[in-house]
Amino acid sequence: MKVSPYLQFTGNCAEAVAFYEKAFGVKAEIVRYKDAPPSEGYSPPPGTEDFIMHASITLGDGVIMFCDVPPGVPCGFGGGVAVTVTMDNVDQVKSCFNALKEGGEVGMELQETFWSKCFGSLDDKFGVSWMLSV
């Protein structure tokens, strides 16, 4: 069994995915609504053709997935859920944490704790909560 977070955005998913590609030093796989094969009885709502239908980034053995929801579909972040990423070394945590905090709000600065040599938490500029640790 594998569990993967699926982060939903309201039209700014491409910006978010580019931000995460840079923060984690990875390349995303992206499918836009306009790239999907035609489906009988369905077409993307006008103005959403460039929205992200599905994107994913691989971090170690895990995958984080993303999409834009169509207009009018409720969506938001917060409320007690965080994406947790455990890394191999302190330098890796510091690099990703510093990139993710740009424009965001730090909940707990990076520090040594009884459970980790380096742990920190933040909400990024898109409102996604992150916990990074070694």
Image: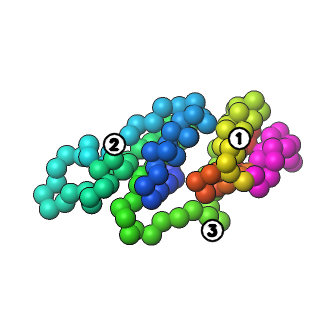
CA distance separating discs 1 and 2? 27 Å
Left or right: 25 as drawn, with respect to 133: left
Q: Quadrant of residue 35?
A: top left
Q: Along the polypeptide, which appears first: circle 3 or circle 1?
A: 3
Reply yes or no: does residue 111 show up in magenta.
yes
Q: Which residues are magenta?
A: 106-120
128 and 2: which is toward the camera = 128
Judging from the image, what secondary structure is the residue with disc 2 in? strand
Q: In the picture, which quadrant includes the C terminus?
A: top right
Furthest toward the front, the residue is 47
Q: Are marks 2 and 3 in contact (CB under 8 Å)?
A: no
Residue ID at (45%, 69%): 74
Which residue in the protein does label 3 denote? 79
Q: Which residue is mark 1?
A: 97
* Residue 41 against residue 59 in the figure, above or below: below
Identify residue for label 2.
Answer: 31
Q: Position of residue 52 (x, y in %)?
A: 38, 48
Q: Amino acid at mark 2?
A: Val
Residue 28 percent location from the top left of the image: 45, 36
